[in-house]
């Protein structure tokens, strides 16, 4: 059974930084797309950054330059470094996995597995 567990959320001031982590277990597929999504109150869930087994990355236009996705394959951990945070970045952040391995613009093509999310709150 695949489990994705996010951590690292919290409350920071505008301009601050956070690093989110996603620990994956039980994943036996040979390929993958792993990604970070977020959902702000009253809004739809949106993709932000994705990475595949080869280390190829893709980002949504609105986060490129401020956020970075990376992975530690030995530890099965996905990271998300977020800098220059703004109040509009306040949201629940989710880790996602897709065995197809395909992604574009920060979205995996077909997400099968979701974490429960970690809350990020940015105060002005």
Image (cartoon, rainbow, N blue to C red):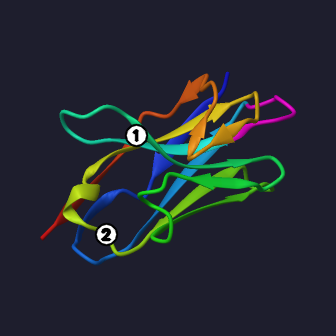
| 65 lies above or below 89 | below
Viewer-closest of 4 and 84: 84
Q: Image quarter for residue 103?
A: top right
The extreme right residue here reads 30
Q: Residue at x 35, y 75 (%)?
A: 84
Q: Residue at x 25, y 54 (%)?
A: 90
The residue at which mark 2 appears reads as 85
- Tell whether label 2 touches label 1 (CB within 8 Å): no
Q: Is residue 92 left or right of residue 74?
A: left
SS at mark 2 in the image? loop
| 94 lies above or below 87 | above
Q: Residue at x 26, y 42 (%)?
A: 40
Residue stretch rendered in magenta on the structure: 27-33
What's the distance in space between the residues labelled 1 and 2, CA to CA?
18 Å
Estimate how packed mark 1 is, as few (under 14), some (14 to 19) or many (20 or more) residues with alpha carbons within 10 Å: many
Estimate how packed mark 2 is, as few (under 14), some (14 to 19) or many (20 or more) residues with alpha carbons within 10 Å: many
SS at mark 1 in the image? loop
Q: How many marks?
A: 2
The picture places residue 46, in percent across and down from the top left corner, at 41, 39
The extreme front residue here reads 61
| 88 lies above or below 35 | below
Q: Is residue 34 left or right of residue 14?
A: right
The residue at which mark 1 appears reads as 117
The picture places residue 59, in percent across and down from the top left corner, at 56, 54
The picture places residue 9, in percent across and down from the top left corner, at 36, 56
> Closer to the camera: disc 1 or disc 2?
2
Q: Is residue 53 left or right of residue 70?
A: right
Q: Main secondary structure of the magenta part?
A: loop
Residue 108 falls inside the magenta stretch: no
Q: Is residue 64 left or right of residue 51?
A: left
């Amino acid at each position: 059974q695949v489990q994705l567990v996010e951590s690292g959320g919290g409350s920071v001031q505008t301009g601050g930084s956070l690093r989110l982590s996603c620990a994956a277990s039980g994943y036996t597929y040979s390929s993958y797309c792993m990604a970070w999504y977020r959902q702000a109150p009253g809004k739809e869930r949106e993709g932000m950054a994705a990475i595949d087994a080869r280390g190829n990355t893709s980002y949504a236009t609105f986060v490129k330059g401020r956020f970075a996705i990376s992975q530690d394959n030995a530890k099965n951990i996905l990271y998300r470094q977020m800098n220059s945070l703004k109040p509009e970045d306040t949201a629940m952040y989710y880790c996602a996995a897709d065995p197809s391995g395909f992604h574009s613009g920060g979205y995996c093509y077909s997400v099968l597995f979701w974490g429960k999310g970690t809350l990020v709150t940015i105060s002005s």
